[in-house]
Image (cartoon, grey):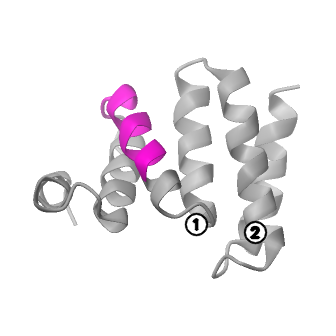
């Protein structure tokens, strides 16, 4: 899906997890507005606190903005969500999240 399709999803359903995550992640991947990406990914994390990829994407966006201290608890929450057994998947992202966290020390 392209950026506009995700923007339309969010416009139609501002409380929709998929649109928020998709738009935030797409902005991050394409080097778009990182502040906007953070905004959408924060909502995605609030809507589905155990979606591990949302935590990872939000952490990456915050790091890209130089907000490392803000990124640490987000990434840690992603590891906790993956480890909790409440998330559907995400365990495979733990090594990547841990590696990111180590760069923030």
Q: Can you give x and y, in whole percent of width and height, for residue 85 in the image?
A: 78, 79
Name the residue rendered at 32%, 32% in the picture.
36
In the picture, the quarter occupied by the C terminus is top right
Name the residue rendered at 75%, 72% in the picture.
92
Secondary-structure class at tag 2: helix
In the picture, the quarter occupied by the N terminus is bottom left
Residue 37 higher or lower than 91, as above or below: above
**Closer to the camera, 23 or 32?**
23
> Which residue in the structure is indicated by mark 2?
82
Magenta span = 32-43
Q: Residues within 10 Å of mark 1 (few under 14, many from 20)?
A: many
Q: CA distance from mark 2 to mark 1?
A: 8 Å
Residue 44 higher or lower than 92, as above or below: above
Q: Quadrant of residue 19?
A: bottom left
Q: Main secondary structure of the magenta part?
A: helix
Q: Quadrant of residue 83?
A: bottom right
Name the residue rendered at 52%, 21% in the picture.
65
Give the mark, 2 or 1, whose residue is nearer the N terminus: 1
> Which residue in the structure is indicated by mark 1?
51
């Amino acid at each position: 899906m392209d950026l506009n399709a995700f923007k339309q999803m969010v416009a139609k359903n501002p409380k929709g997890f998929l649109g928020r995550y998709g738009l935030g992640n797409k902005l991050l991947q394409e080097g778009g507005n990182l502040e906007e990406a953070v905004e959408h990914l924060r909502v995605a994390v609030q809507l589905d606190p155990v979606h591990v990829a949302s935590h990872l994407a939000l952490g990456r966006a915050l790091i890209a903005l130089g907000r490392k201290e803000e990124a640490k608890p987000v990434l840690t929450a992603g590891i906790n969500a993956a480890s909790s057994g409440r998330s559907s998947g995400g365990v495979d992202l733990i090594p990547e999240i841990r590696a990111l966290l180590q760069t923030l020390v």
